[in-house]
Amino acid sequence: MAKSEEKLLERESAPAVEAPSVPVEKVSGQDGERIPLTVQTSKRKDSIDSCAETPEGSEWATGAIIIIWYILNAWWNIDNKEVLTKCGLPWTVATFQLFVGWLFVFCPLWLLGWRRFPRASRGVVLRNLLPQGVCHFLTHIGAMIALQAGAVSFTYTVKAAEPVTTAILSALFLSQFYSWPSVIALIPIVGGVIGASLGAQGVDSLGFSWTSFLGASASNLGSSSRTIYLKLLREEVRRLVKSMFLRLPYTDPEAPASPATQTNSVSGGEAAQAAALALAIPRRSITNEILETMPASEAADIIRSFAPSNVFACVILVASLLTFPAAVFFEGARALDFFRRVGGGEDLEAPMGGDPVSARGVFGVLCRSALTYFLWNELAYAIMRRTSAVTYSVANVVKRVAVMCAAIFVLNEPLNATTAAGMFIVILGTALYTHARTKFG
């Protein structure tokens, strides 16, 4: 998710609707008579991230993207398990994947101007982007350690308990408390994880290990913490946009043009009331109103620069700078030996025993995992732009099932009735939690 997985599910995602008209007053006429003026928010349905209407008939394209997302995510996890089993370097693997993401992908996009470089102040960087990077560091390295130590299916069963961590952190740091139906829906998730853990202990050492459990739990903690900071960042950008919006004149297309300026702008209290109305409705309508009112403004540019995929690029940049010294400290000598063997075309001695494996072959799988890591995260943001939060949440639950099934069948991971029942209960609990959060909050 890694971090893109749950963290970004917390975005505001209520469907855009036409906001109600609100009467305000404007000054008109030579005698300064105040007459009613109706202020109405944007009718556009698109989100700031897409800035375009979803084309008609795109449901098929969205479905295809979701299927490709499942395939890439399952492929990434299977490749991770293969690389980690053969080279045993979780810190090095995590660092390599993160560096490939921002150094060879995001940097060219910024340099070529295909994406806006995030316009963050020093305060935003220190208060939010750096902590998000630390959280992603914990999320990614926790997942790598868990995948090396235990089964992929077991790791993702534990990671499915992330909503529990998010609920606790939201209550502690944001004073946001979930409804009772949502809290009750968390119980089967916890119970399912416990059942799967007990069942995995009875299979063999590859199914369950405390290292795998703690690594997946640390990944959940990092992912949930990143979600909290993402909420705070969204509110900070929202406040900035509000302050800029309130300073703008409001343009009423039905108002008569001023003889002096030949414009139909209304300033002052009318703009403030329009902004107040806009800020009371879903975020996508706010941002679209701003884009329509001031398409070339600084606020619009700031909003676009903080698109989720751009924020993710900054986050993995920080995370990679944290994992690199840790990888040098924990695995420096072994990592150098691995890359030396890759350059010399030598074989590796598999940590779990067995026949030696080609170092270059393992490096090829590592490169593929870095590419699929970037691609499935990009597709996750594309799906977010095309679907509602409910649809994305359901798709994410199904993705976990797809990863578990792929790991069981492709990697022949051990499974017994208790573990299977625990996995089923976790998935069912996650689906119930998604429904409860949508309906009750």
Image (spheres, rainbow, N blue to C red):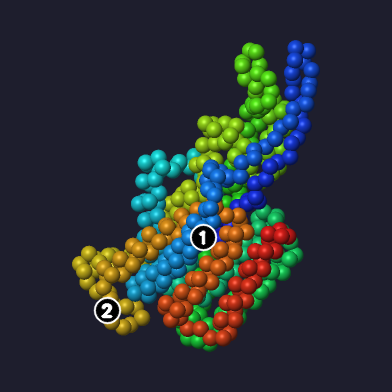
User: Label 1: which residue?
Assistant: 63
Instruction: Determine whether the residue tagged by mark 2 lies in a helix, strand or loop.
Output: loop
Crowdedness of circle 1 by 10 Å Cα count: few (<14), some, many (20+)?
Answer: few
Measure the C-alpha gap from mark 1 to mark 2.
41 Å
Identify residue type, mark 2.
Pro
Q: Amino acid at mark 1?
A: Gly
Query: Looking at the image, which is closer to me, 108 or 232?
Result: 108
Q: Which residue is mark 2?
A: 356
Residue 21 place in picture, x, y as percent: 74, 36
Is 62 left or right of 324, judged from the image as shown?
right
SS at circle 1: helix
Q: Position of residue 4 (x, y in %)?
A: 51, 58
Q: Residues within 10 Å of mark 2 (few under 14, many from 20)?
A: few
Q: Closer to the camera, 291 or 236?
A: 291
Residue appearing at x 41%, y 71% in the figure: 78
**Quarter where residue 373 is shown:** bottom left
**Looking at the rendered structure, which numbered label has been put on residue 399?**
none
Residue 200 drawn at (x, y percent): 53, 82
Which residue is rendered at x = 53% and y = 86% of the image?
Answer: 416
Give the quadrant of residue 24.
top right
Task: Identify which residue is drawn at 38% across, 64% down.
Answer: 369
From what the image shows, is residue 268 above or below residue 140?
A: above
